[in-house]
Image (cartoon, rainbow, N blue to C red):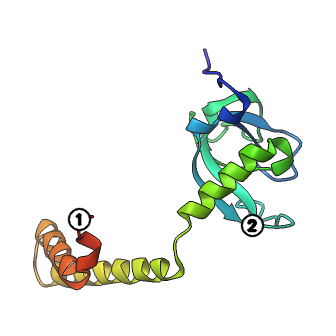
Amino acid sequence: MTEQPSNVEDSVWVRRHWNDWRHGRVLLTSMRHFHLRDAFGGVGARPPRPMLFARIWCDSIIEGEIAHSCAHGPAPHEVLVCIVQRDNSKVLYKRLLAMVEMMRPEPGEIAAAAEIANFSIRATSELLQAGLTYEQALAEVQRLTREKWPHLFEQH
């Protein structure tokens, strides 16, 4: 039996595309990676404004249906869904938007993460070419990263 929400704020109505007539209800606890975007995958259609999205498993729909067939293999599949404001209560939608805003990185955080990722990739490649095993290269990159960015590893 499918788990049912204890109240209306515990579930969210979702669609595959903002203008799709099909929509399904999903438990809030079954959703992840809430974010805003202004373009869809697949058909590449642009919504009229940035919209709220999340990821779900296709078998987590507890009511209704969304545009997904499971034709490309056995379920469950990860599905990107759109959360349309008019399908949900204002209180719930504002709560989800506030959650997205809290998770949004500061402008410098994205650049810093990219710098660290590029450093790690470059250093690992160089160490492997120098003859270190993967495990040795990984340990050395971790040491170098801690040395170069010590504030990331401080205990709070």
The disc at residue 39 is: 2
Q: Residue furthest top?
A: 1
Which quadrant holds residue 21?
top right
Whether residue 16 is situated above or below residue 42 in the rendered picture: above
- The image position of residue 58, as x and y in percent, is 63, 37
Question: Could you classify mark 2 by the number of other residues whose Cα lies within 10 Å: few (under 14), some (14-19), or many (20 or more)?
Answer: some
Q: Is residue 120 toward the left or the right of residue 83 in the image?
A: left
Q: Could you say where residue 80 lies in the image, as x and y percent from the top left?
A: 66, 51
- What amino acid type is highlighted by mark number 1? Gln
Picture quarter with the N terminus: top right
Residue 121 higher or lower than 20, as above or below: below
Vertical relation: 9 (above or below) 52: above
Q: Nearer the viewer, residue 153 or 34?
A: 153
Q: Position of residue 104 (x, y in %)?
A: 56, 67
Camera sees residue 124: no
Q: Residue at x 29, y 78 (%)?
A: 120
Residue at x 52%, y 76% (from the top left corner)? 106
Q: Which secondary structure, mark 1?
A: loop
Q: Position of residue 124 (x, y in %)?
A: 23, 78
> Which residue is denoted by mark 1 in the rendering?
155
